[in-house]
Image (tube, helix red, strand yellow):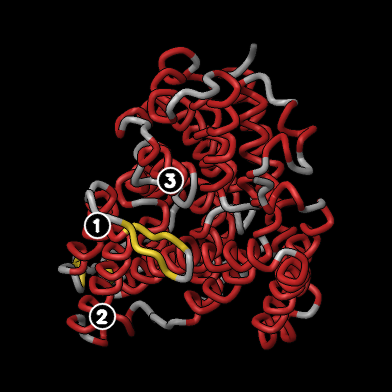
Amino acid sequence: MVTLGEKLPLVTVLPFVGILLSIALFPLVLPRFWQKHFGKITLFWALLSILPLLYLFPIETLHEILHTLLAEYIPFILLISSLYIISGNIYLHGNFSGTPLFNIIYLFISTFLASLMGTSGASVVLVRPLIRANAWRKDTAHVFIFFIFLVSNIGGALTPLGDPPLFLGFLKGVPFFWTLNLFPTMFFCVIYLLILFFIIDSLHYRREKSFLPKNKEKKPFVILGWYNIFFLIGVPLTILISANLPLPSLKFFGVERPLNEIIRDLFLVLLAGISYYITPKKVREKNEFTFFPIKEVAILFLGIFMSMIPALNILKAGEKGALKPLIISLNEPAHYFWMTGILSAFLDNAPTYLTFLSTCLGKFYPGLAEKEAILRLIQDYPKYLLAISEGAVFFGALTYIGNAPNFMVRSIVEEKGIPMPSFFGYLIKFSFPILIPMFLLLTLIFYRS
């Protein structure tokens, strides 16, 4: 049976390119127009992507749209929303001062918490105290860009709870603690980035330290809404427990969804609802909590998920699709690292991870059962799985859309009045000059043939 991805030409990816360029250029060229009409622009690209496919391949396309909405977008937005709401009900109060020393220690601790809390949870919870600590400073965009690099992406490498691709790998048969093998490369990245951050932040601090409040009133460290920490812990626990429930699947409009995933999503809504209901309004007011950042993420990522359908299906088609020359050129771990990484920076990193994992298993163990093949891959060719895992997790930091928490952090920070670089500004001024050399060093040290 010929799949949808095998039928699609590369031209069907153009609306996805269009929505990326819109996110990149409109806020820079027409910021007021974008702020007022970003939902309509997003809808335009989504419809331009799916309507021609619905006309040419109605049954397959309708199934892909429903699968994307029910199995991917809705679970994604419920997870992000529950974390955002619960974290908004927690207010850390104390004498935080955004000196380079404080910032580097805070980033280091937060990075490793991300592997326990998940990059999404750690990002939305830990960014607000960092914003308050640096509120007296005039130029702090770099602080939150390095926060995105470290906490929203690289910090999620050590456990399957840290980042969605690793969790999918766990569900496919990768042992839970195998991801600890990513520690050497993760630690290298963390040290590299923290050294660079300390240099950059110290240079900014020298120009700004005259603004440091004098005789600042000492405030005891207090956590308002502390009981919400249990709801926050409940989110990754819910994900982990639900993944291991032996429950049947249900079908919605022809799309199969495991009952345990439906229960998981409902429980996330319940956790967020109870957290919001029992927490006094004044806690959210202290956090300057609004629903706009999550609304912006929900609208933009709906358009991204829809317009990504052709690109992901072509990728999933492997050697039978329009990207055949790219797929057959993968021979070394370094190839998988860079290819998985670059595509993860612009597409959803979870299906990208699965696609290249399947490609690798088919290359070495054709016809072998998936779980057995994964265990054989770990035993015989562990560098390949390391390369795919690290590419999917680390390269997410390369763009604002490389991982959902990136855009969430940007929205939260901008809502607090801190200007962040545009899509291209982020690429040209920060991610490319800082991250690409780091990835090259990783290749030379860990993946050289």
Which residue shows up at 68% across the image and 20% down it? 331
Mark 2 is on which residue type?
A: Tyr
Q: Give whichever of 148, 204 is nearer the camera.
A: 148
Q: Relative to residue 227, is residue 427 depicted above or below?
A: above
C-alpha gap between disc 2 and disc 3: 32 Å
In the rendered structure, the answer to whether residue 173 lies left or right of residue 23 reads left
Residue located beneath label 3 in the image: 104
Q: Give whichever of 249, 228 is nearer the camera.
A: 249
In the rendered structure, the answer to whether residue 181 lies left or right of residue 309 reads left
Mark 3 is on which residue type?
A: Ile
Q: Dot 2, crowdedness within 10 Å: few (<14), some or many (≥20)? A: some
C-alpha gap between disc 3 and disc 1: 31 Å
Q: Which mark is first along the chain, 1 or 2?
A: 1
Q: Which mark is residue 276?
A: 2
The answer to whether mark 2 and mark 3 are in CB contact below 8 A is no
C-alpha gap between disc 2 and disc 1: 18 Å
Q: Which mark is first along the chain, 3 or 2?
A: 3
Q: Dot 1, crowdedness within 10 Å: few (<14), some or many (≥20)? A: some
Residue located beneath label 1 in the image: 238
Q: Provide the secondary structure element on which disc 2 rests.
A: helix
In the rendered structure, the answer to whether residue 29 lies left or right of residue 339 reads right
Q: Quadrant of the N terminus?
A: top right
Which residue shows up at 22% across the image and 50% down it? 245
